[in-house]
């Protein structure tokens, strides 16, 4: 009887310690700021398409996709309605791979990268064109990661770090501005910018947010740097430990893919300060094990987020990088409440979605 009583006491003590450890873990998660999508019972994977009124969203989405065009498989840019209907191939270039599209603020143009040439002569260049696919203009050779200025008059882009072609997303060195009216190029004041990618220009024209990997003293993560100055700030201290950031059009929210949980997270961001501040980190899309959600983009009204979703491949051939195939990946839309749905279903390497502020209420 004595041994049985001691055994029960020991079990009781272990139970208390276990509960305390769970409580401590929960406190650490709260302190870090990131919370599950739904604390009671997280929804894993996409919801039924009917969960979001996609037809009421008056914008289009442009994305990259690897599929057969005129008898040959290659990367093309497709434009679709927010519900996935009316898919249109904007490029139709079997010998050129177009990827990483970004629509201009007024929705009339799109900038993108194009992989051209074969073998050792292959090179990644930056272009822009009209949103209907006409009027293609080359911006820069051996360049990548283009994005638009808030007024749509300038394209920012990174130069390639090496002359030889690579799909490594962080192989960049030097940020430049291209003026559409004059065709002139100007380097960013901070000439030390390198190994940054997925750059996003803030709506107030004062900041960029971007990924960095092994550059400027940063091992990796998301940074903010001045658009017209030399200041660079690490956002990791605010609980952001993911990749591929995007800013909402109102400049008040930042979104990204969370590294450890491969979920989509958003947070409030204050870019009116001399040093950007982030608060209220929260999840908006939780992924099933073995899958990845990434490459986020906020809708023009800041109410929705689009992203890619599919089976995960880590390592040197990570399938969310530009130029790498992603079989089974599709484009999704979430409403920032935890609901998210697939709007494409063919799994043809559909990635890099970007909202286009084209009103489609007439459809």
Image (cartoon, grey):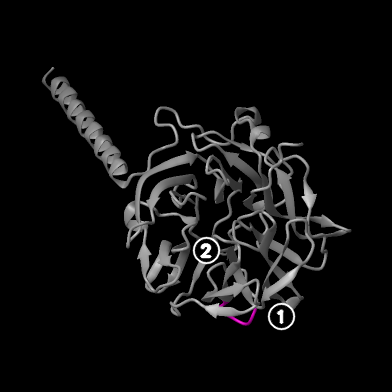
**Could you tell me which quadrant the C terminus lies in?**
top right
- Looking at the image, which residue is at 69% across and 59% down? 109
Disc ID at residue 296: none
Find the distance from the CA under tag 2 to the CA under tag 1: 27 Å
Is residue 319 on the magenta stretch?
no
Q: Residue 104 at x, y = what percent?
A: 63, 58
Q: In the displayed structure, would residue 102 be above or below residue 330? A: below
Residue drawn at (13%, 17%), measured in percent from left and top? 1
Residue 199, numbered label? 2
The part of the chain drawn in magenta is: 160-164
Which x, y percent locates residue 258?
A: 46, 50
Q: Which residue is disc 1 drawn over?
A: 120
Q: Residue 4: name its quadrant.
A: top left
Say left or right for 87 vs 281: right
Q: Is residue 21 left or right of residue 33?
A: left
The answer to which of 9 and 86 lies nearer the viewer is 86
């Amino acid at each position: 009887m004595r041994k049985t009583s001691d055994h029960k006491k020991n079990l009781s003590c272990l139970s208390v310690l276990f509960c305390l450890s769970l409580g401590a873990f929960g406190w650490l998660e709260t302190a870090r700021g990131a919370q599950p999508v739904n604390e009671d019972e997280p929804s894993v994977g996409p919801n039924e398409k009917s969960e979001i009124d996609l037809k009421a969203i008056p914008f289009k989405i442009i994305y990259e996709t690897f599929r057969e065009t005129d008898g040959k498989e290659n990367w093309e840019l497709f434009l679709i309605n927010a519900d996935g209907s009316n898919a249109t191939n904007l490029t139709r270039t079997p010998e050129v791979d177009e990827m990483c599209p970004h629509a201009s603020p007024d929705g009339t143009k799109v900038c993108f990268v194009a992989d051209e040439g074969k073998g050792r002569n292959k090179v990644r260049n930056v272009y822009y064109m009209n949103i209907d696919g006409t009027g293609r203009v080359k911006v820069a050779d051996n360049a990548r990661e283009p994005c638009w200025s808030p007024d749509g008059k300038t394209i920012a882009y990174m130069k390639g770090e090496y002359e030889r072609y690579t799909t490594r997303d962080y192989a960049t060195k030097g940020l430049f501005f291209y003026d559409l009216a004059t065709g002139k190029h100007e380097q960013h004041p901070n000439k030390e910018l390198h190994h940054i990618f997925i750059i996003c220009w803030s709506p107030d024209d004062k900041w960029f947010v971007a990924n960095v990997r092994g550059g400027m003293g940063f091992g990796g993560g998301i940074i903010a740097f001045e658009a017209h100055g030399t200041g660079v700030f690490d956002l990791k201290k605010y609980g952001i430990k993911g990749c591929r950031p995007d800013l909402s059009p109102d400049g008040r929210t930042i979104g990204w893919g969370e590294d450890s949980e491969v979920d989509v997270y958003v947070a409030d961001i204050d870019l009116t300060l001399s040093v950007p501040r982030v608060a209220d980190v929260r999840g908006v899309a939780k992924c099933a094990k073995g899958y990845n959600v990434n490459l986020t983009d906020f809708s023009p009204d800041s109410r929705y987020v689009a992203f890619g979703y599919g089976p995960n491949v880590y390592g040197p051939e990570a399938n969310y990088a530009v130029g790498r195939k992603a079989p089974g990946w599709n484009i999704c839309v979430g409403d920032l409440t935890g609901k998210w749905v697939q709007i494409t279903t063919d799994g043809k390497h559909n990635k890099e979605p970007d909202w286009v502020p084209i009103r489609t209420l007439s459809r």
